[in-house]
Image (cartoon, helix red, strand yellow):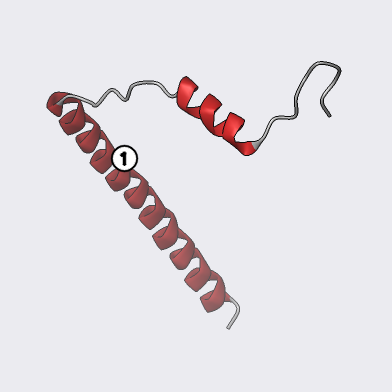
Amino acid sequence: MAGKGERKRNYLDFIGDFFKEVKKVVWPTPKQTFKNTWITLVMIFLVGTFVWVIDVGLDRLFRLIMSISK
């Protein structure tokens, strides 16, 4: 609620504030992009391998439990 001497802000005020606060976009260099791409691919491979190892381990444990319970 607006106090004495203050006017109520409308959506145009918020839009104006947004554009005043927007900073210049700094694009990465090709070297940075290449490095970040490789880091991403390596992390995907490592996480995928980790999930696969856990999956295989739990599958074998489940099969062992099922073979013992027969």
Residue 11 coordinates in the image, percent (x, y): 62, 37
Outermost residue, left side: 30
Residue 22 coordinates in the image, percent (x, y): 43, 24
- Vertical relation: 5 (above or below) 37: above
| Side (left or right) of 40 relative to 1 | left
Residue 64 coordinates in the image, percent (x, y): 50, 70
- Quarter of the image containing the C terminus? bottom right
Outermost residue, top side: 5
Q: Amino acid at mark 1?
A: Met
Residue 57 coordinates in the image, percent (x, y): 43, 59
- Work out whether residue 54 or residue 41 is closer to the camera in this orientation and state it: 41
Under circle 1, the secondary element is helix
- Quarter of the image containing the N terminus? top right
**Residue at the image position 60 percent from the left and 29 percent from the top:** 13
- Vertical relation: 64 (above or below) 38: below
- Work out whether residue 16 or residue 46 is closer to the camera in this orientation and state it: 16
| Side (left or right) of 18 relative to 7 | left
- From the image, tell me which residue sits under label 1: 43
**Residue at the image position 75 percent from the left and 24 percent from the top:** 7
**Residue at the image position 47 percent from the left and 21 percent from the top:** 20
Mark 1 Cα shell of 10 Å, populated few (<14), some (14-19), many (≥20):
few
- Vertical relation: 35 (above or below) 3: below
- Work out whether residue 48 or residue 4 is closer to the camera in this orientation and state it: 4
